[in-house]
Image (cartoon, rainbow, N blue to C red):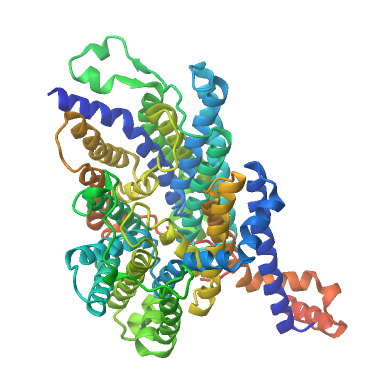
Amino acid sequence: MNFVVQLLSMTMSFSVALLLASLGEMFNQRAGVFNLGCEGVMAMGAFVGMLIPFTIGQGGAVSMWWYVLSYVVAAFVGALLGLLFGVITVTFRAPQGIAGIGLQMFGVGLAGALFRTFVGGTQSIPTIPKLAIPLLSKITYIGEIFFNLNIVAYLSYIFVPVAWLILFKTPWGLKIRAVGTHPRAADSMGINVNRTRYEALAFGSALASISGCFLSTAQAGLFSDTMIAGRGFIAVALVYFGHWHPLQILGGALLFTFAQSLQTGIQSLGISFPYELLVMLPYVLVVVVLSFTSRNDTMAPAQLGKPFNREIRT
Amino acid sequence: MTENSFKIVYKLSVAVLAVLIAIAISAIVLAVVGANVLDAFYMIVFQPLTSIGHISEVLLRAIPLCIVALGVCIAYRSGIINIGGEGQMAMGVIAFTGVALAMEGLPIFIHLPLAILAAILGGALWGFIPGILKAKLKVSELLSTVMLNYIAAQLYSLCLRTIYMDPAGGGTPMSKRLSSSVFLSRIGRTPIHVGLIFALILAVLVWLLMWKTTLGYKMRAAGSGARAARYGGINVAFYVTLAISISGAFAGLAGAVEIGGVHRRMIEGVTNGYGFAGVVVALFGGLHPFGIIPAAFFFGLMKYGVMRAASQMGIPANMVDVIQGITILVIVTAQMIMSNTYLQARIRRNLGKLILTKKEREEIAQNRAEGGAK
């Protein structure tokens, strides 16, 4: 039982990384932009998140406000990268798949290069402490699993319904869905299609960057070139899996984080089992899940991946 | 200036501008990571050309780049983007080493072809999976190939740590030195191996396949317009799957020549980013075999140059990724600007006074007036 509780509590605390990145990608894709550069944005976020507390405290404890600052800066850097991607894919209408690969290489490479220069070798920072909620965290099992997380995790779970509200109940959300489904109709109703896509890209990439920041400041307490380990790509796949809906994406994020936690959990039990097979599991799961979900993609935004050109008659 | 010559000037100036922008961004990043920009550029791009020893190191890196990029080119032309080169190459290495270790004692003219064939099949299998998933189940190849990269990397490490591990290696995850019957011979006294000749021959073969045969025509048709191709009676699903399988086979072969020609045992990190770099090389080479050859040389040069700059000037080795990322972003953008005839016409009109003759100006003005009258 302890083992199961440990697995589940690990899932709850660590699924934030996939969840936020996926929600960000959902906003991008709802606006019709397929952002494969998520991985690179996350890497930059993770680097920025690590850089600020490390520079201030040199690896020692620092005030929580520096962490807040690192999240803000990470969001800003992410938004900038999103806008850069917008210039390439929205303004110049470049093919989004291959441009995304470029952004991914650029982001991961730049984060690694800057890390070598400004931080150096393997350095660690104290992670954001857990915040047990009084009374609720005392409930057997449930308290341990749901009410003993860090503040970022609580906020992220609260953000899921908020994302739903933004997407389905605000004018801005409606605009995003309109430019992703039928940009020409949106254009004729006076919505600036490219501007809305830029906004969605900035917002979504800021979320991806924050999720990278979570990885370095709350989950690992360090940065390395390989720490994102395909989470950005899994996040993109999760959007398909979650049918572009925040609540289903939450389910997907929990499922995949559970698969990832299994590896740490089983290793900690000391069972001799080729750990590579466990590390492989989430990636295999992505391929299997995509095989079952991609075929009926009637839920997908109709103009996903297609640039909008006002000047061409269709 | 006539419209046609303006077109050429337009494309050329976009290309020059793109190169300048790419260099400028790289220079900024180099300056931020604290390097002397001019020294760094000299060391990365020019110094490796100054001696035979350096050039052969560059060629050594260009060989796998070229082979992987040729595969990427076939897939890209057929409408499927293969970013799984890394995993396909790893599978090639696993298969090659497996045959090399299991069938020791065979003569070289049987053993080497068998091992290479195994590598090709290994890579092709890793290309076939995303291909069939895309063709039958509409799974995005961008996601499935990346996932297969990670899966292959784990298989690689698993093999290296268990069945392939050299018991005399003192726990280092590497295989024992392979028998000489799977070595690719080296050319003269240089470290360059016959893989160089393979790469050049393959480039010609790819050109023949894609532009001179019906098979290639059908693959390119599937890539340039799937619906039209289907209407023309081409089985798009089949040709797309075939293209990415061939693409995977190329990456597998690249793995084989790396082991048989360079390392001669399986070690960690053989794939070394060649799979992703292959995509950059293919794009940089204009998705044409004869463009890929110089592009592979250029990126081999850069890979070697950055490696030297990393050890001698302390530049982070990740600069290779940064430059590759910038290259992709700039190329795809420049291509869109080049093919944007609206923008081209608008610039021509706005530059009117500078470049148009009086007669042409009057013609444009007249056209405008007529358009307004309608």
Q: Is residue A121 left or right of residue A237?
A: right
Q: Quadrant of residue B44?
A: bottom right
- Against A201, residue B81 (above or below) is below
- Against B218, residue A255 (above or below) is above
Q: Is residue A12 left or right of residue A119?
A: left
The residue lying toward the viewer, choosing from B374 and A192, is A192
Q: How many marks?
A: 0
- Against B101, residue A146 (above or below) is above
Which residue is outermost to the left? A1
> In this orientation, does residue A204 appear?
no
The residue lying toward the viewer, choosing from B364 and B60, is B60
Q: Quadrant of the N terminus of chain B?
A: bottom right
**Residue B284 location, x and y as percent?**
54, 68
**Residue A88 location, x and y as percent?**
57, 57
The residue lying toward the viewer, choosing from A193 and A149, is A149
> In this orientation, does residue A9 appear?
yes
**Residue A90 location, x and y as percent?**
55, 57
Q: Is residue B300 left or right of residue B46?
A: left
**Residue B87 location, x and y as percent?**
33, 59
